[in-house]
Image: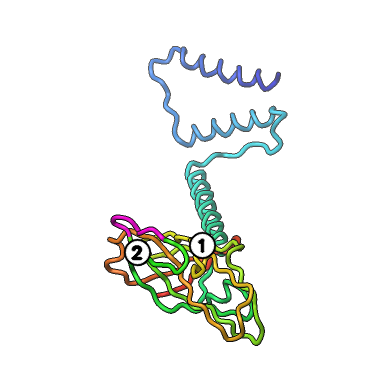
Amino acid sequence: MKYKKIILCILLFCICLSFSGCTKMYELTSEEEEKIVLYSAKMIAKYNRASHEGYSFVNPERMKKAEEEKKAKEEEEAAKHADEEGDDTQSISSFSDIIGIEGVTFGYVDYEIVQSIEAPDIAIPDAGEGNSYIVLNFTATNSSDAPIAVDLLNNSIGYKLSINDNVTAENYSTLSQVDLSTYYNDNLEPGASEDLVLLFTCNSLYLQDLTSMTMQVSKGSQVFNVKLQ
C-alpha cells in the first residue's frame, strides 16, 4: 500500500509541475535526470516487498556489453558442442581394423568406373542413363593358421564414398558372393584370399575428373574415413 502511495505522490507532483503558472518549462540537465531516476528507483525498491537486492542503475553501455558477452558465450558453447559431435568421425588408415575380424585382413586394390557389371552368381542391372558404377576392388585374406568364419552379411556396417570432397556416392549393395558388404564365408582357410568388390552409384558427370576418394564407413555410432586416393 505504501508503495502505491509513493508512486501516486510522484505522479501528482509531476502533474502539478506541468500545470504550474510558469510560462517557461524548466529543462533538467542529464545529471538532474539521473538523480531523479536513481531516487525513484530507490524508493520503489525500498517499499517493494518482492525486492531483496535494493536498486541498481541500468547503464545502456553495460547492458550492451552484457548482451555481447552472453552471445559470445552461447557461440562458444555451440562450437564446443559441434566439436564433441565431430569426435564420432575418425580418420583411420586400416580398413581391416574397422571390420574387426581378428586374423582376416581386408586390402584395397584399385577402382574402376563402368556402366554395367557381370557378377558370377546374380544379375546386376545397368547403372542407368547418366549414371555409372564405381567398383572398389578388395581382397580378404586369412592371415592366421586356422580357418576363420567371416560374416559381413549380418552386421551393421554402412558405406558411402566421398568424391573430390564434394560429392557423395551411395553404396549399391547386392547379394552376390563377391560383394564385400554382404560377404559370408563360414570357413576361410588359412592363407586363402577372396576377391571382393564394393559398388557405388553416381552421376557420370562427377566422375570425369576424379582426383580424390574417401570411403566413409559407419559402424554403430562411429564413422571412419578411409582415404583411397
User: Sequence order check: which comes first, mark 1 or mark 2?
Assistant: 2
Q: Main secondary structure of the magenta part?
A: loop
Instruction: Name the residue nearer the viewer: 170 or 84.
Output: 170
The residue under the point 33% across, 67% down is 114
- How far is disc 1 from disc 2 in space, using C-alphas? 16 Å
User: Which part of the image, by quadrant, shows the N terminus?
Assistant: top right
209 is higher (above) or lower (below) than 12: below
Q: Tag 1, which secondary structure?
A: loop
- Return the mark for residue 17: none
Tell me if residue 5 is in the magenta stretch: no
Query: Is 148 left, or right, of 27 in this rendering?
Result: right
Q: Which residues are magenta?
A: 124-131
99 is higher (above) or lower (below) than 143: above
Residue type (three-letter) at the residue carrying disc 1: Leu
Where is residue 8? Give x, y as percent.
60, 17
Which residue was labeled with disc 2?
116
Instruction: Name the residue nearer the viewer: 74 or 95.
Output: 95
User: Which part of the image, by quadrant, shows the C terminus?
Assistant: bottom left
Instruction: Name the residue nearer the viewer: 22 or 80.
Output: 80
Instruction: Name the residue nearer the viewer: 87 or 144.
Output: 144
Which residue was labeled with disc 1?
175
123 is higher (above) or lower (below) than 50: below
